[in-house]
Image (cartoon, rainbow, N blue to C red):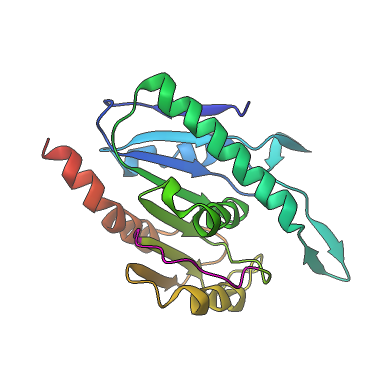
Amino acid sequence: MLQYLHRIHSKSAPNLVLLHGYGSHMHDLFGLADYFPQFNIFALQAPHSTGMGGYAWYSIQWDNGDKIIEPKEVAAAGASVKAQYELIHQEHGLTGPTVLGGFSQGAILSAQVMLHNPEFAQGYLLMSGYLLPQWNEVPAIEAPVLQTHGVQDPVIPFEWAERGAQKLQHLPNYQFESYAMGHSLNEPCLTSIQKFLGHWGNDASNK
């Protein structure tokens, strides 16, 4: 099964599940834990080594500079994340709501879960990712969704994120926010994420 890092406050606290990007590892997003003090944090690690201590959720092929991603591989990775979290949920007896979030490749994977199993989480956080072109059907997702992206992103162009935003903009609780940054998370972006997660965090602090 997948490796993961975790910090647990209580069984009833809200849970934030984080999926890192291509070539990164579970310690990367776990480093953001202090920004979300009210949450139980679970930072999962992808299963496929990319070398130099990095990992990937699925393979990326290159064709004349274009990224070729096989949707079936993304679906399989999504199923792996779901299965791992179900084990985590049972092992720790968690009862609070869950927010699934990811950065870059992790955001794409989070979107896969959101679009195909929207009931998995009570909120979704898509950081510097995009929707695959093949994903044209968007179910009726009631859960809050925040998508963030840097307008100077050299890895995943801002236009790719905008195309996905156009597919999601009709959802009742969807937000798309852009920032003056590259393929990263700056302080204004993190502040917006804190505000987005504040609903669940404030609920936890009032218990």
- The residue at 77%/49% (across/down) is 59
Residue 185 falls within the magenta-colored stretch:
no
Q: Residue furthest left?
A: 206
- The residue at 12%/35% (across/down) is 207
Residue 138 falls within the magenta-colored stretch:
yes
> Could you tell me residue 60's position as x and y percent?
78, 55
Q: Is residue 12 left or right of residue 49?
A: left
How many numbered circles does the render carry? 0
Q: Which stretch appears magenta?
A: 135-144
- The residue at 31%/37% (across/down) is 39
- Asked where in the image residue 36 lies, by quadrant, the reply is top left
Image quarter hosting the N terminus: top right
- Asked where in the image residue 14 lies, by quadrant, the reply is top left
> Could you tell me residue 204's position as x and y percent?
19, 39
> Could you tell me residue 136's position as x and y percent?
60, 73
- The residue at 66%/50% (across/down) is 75
Is 136 rendered above or below residue 100? below
Q: In this view, does 27 lie to the left or right of 170?
A: right
Q: Is residue 101 left or right of residue 93?
A: right
> Could you tell me residue 49's position as x and y percent?
75, 36
Q: Which of 31 and 67 is in front in this view?
A: 67
Is 105 rendered above or below residue 55? below
